[in-house]
């Protein structure tokens, strides 16, 4: 279980890093930021819900 917890946290960090890259390379940074926020929010909420249930 400890490994899964670490892996989940690592995936969140990786997801945020990819989002920063996507925003950095986008032509319209404001639009891309608006697109990335709900994606990461849903990922973090899903991880929290999974941790709460598990």
Image: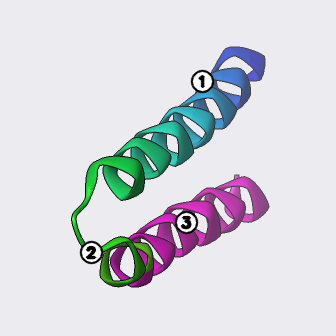
Q: Is residue 13 above or below residue 38?
A: above
Foreground disc of the pair 2, 3: 2
Which one is in front, 28 or 13? 28
Q: Residue furthest top?
A: 3
Residue at left 50%, top 75%?
37
The residue indicated by pointer 3 is: 46
Q: Which mark is residue 40?
A: none
Q: Is residue 18 above or below residue 34?
A: above
Residue 13 drawn at (x, y percent): 62, 36
Residue at left 53%, top 34%?
11
The residue indicated by pointer 2 is: 28
Q: Report the colour scheme.
A: rainbow
| Neighbours of disc 3 within 10 Å: few (<14), some (14-19), many (20+) | few
Residue 32 drawn at (x, y percent): 32, 73
Q: Is residue 43 left or right of residue 18?
A: right
Residue 51 drawn at (x, y percent): 73, 54
Q: Is residue 32 left or right of residue 43?
A: left
Q: Is residue 37 left or right of residue 21?
A: right
In terms of image quadrants, where is residue 10? top right
Label 2, label 3: how far apart the Cα atoms are: 28 Å
Which one is in front, 15 or 1? 15
Start-end of magenta stretch: 34-54
Q: Is residue 25 above or below residue 38?
A: above
Which one is in front, 20 or 10? 20
In terms of image quadrants, where is residue 12? top right
The residue indicated by pointer 1 is: 7
**At numbered mark 2, what does the secondary structure look like: helix, strand or loop?**
loop
Label 2, label 1: how far apart the Cα atoms are: 32 Å
Whether residue 46 appears in magenta in the rendering, the answer is yes
Q: Is residue 49 above or below residue 15?
A: below
């Amino acid at each position: 279980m400890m490994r899964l917890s670490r892996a989940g946290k690592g995936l969140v960090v990786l997801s945020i890093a990819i989002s920063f890259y996507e925003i950095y390379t986008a032509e319209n940074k404001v639009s891309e930021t608006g697109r990335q926020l709900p994606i990461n929010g849903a990922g973090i909420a899903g991880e929290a819900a999974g941790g709460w249930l598990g």
